[in-house]
Amino acid sequence: MDSKHRKTLQAIFEKPDRANIAWKDIEILFVALGAEISEGNGSRVRIALKDVRAVFHRPHPRKETNKGAVKSVRRFLEAAGVKP
């Protein structure tokens, strides 16, 4: 994991929750952590990391995630044993 991945991970775990993290950066972090990503219907993205699975929606038309999505990503990462 490089410094950009670490910054994204720290932003996901920041309090108060941020709403300006680019979804592309989150997907790149998932890949760096060894997750498998597959496309679902519409804007859905399936993520599998260390036997933990989740489905997220890519934000549109904006590129940044909202606070609710950031909380969901944080819960997913915690369930997979990932912390900053």
Image (spheres, grey):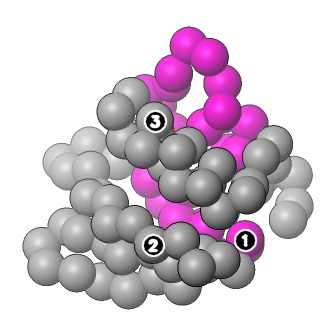
| In the image: residue 50, left or right of residue 4 | left
Would residue 2 be counted in the magenta stretch?
no
Q: Which badge, 1 or 3, comes first in the chain's sequence? A: 1
| In the image: residue 65, left or right of residue 74 | left
Looking at the rendering, the stretch of residues picked out in magenta corresponds to 8-33
Height in image: 39 above or below 19?
below
Q: Secondary structure at mark 1?
A: loop
The residue labelled by disc 3 is: 71
* Residue type of the residue flagged with mark 3: Lys
Image quarter hosting the N terminus: bottom right
The answer to whether one can see residue 22 in this image is no
Q: Secondary structure at mark 3?
A: helix
- Label 2 and label 3: CA atoms lie apart by 15 Å
Is 43 or 74 nearer to us in this picture? 74
The residue labelled by disc 1 is: 33
The residue labelled by disc 2 is: 53
Height in image: 19 above or below 43?
above
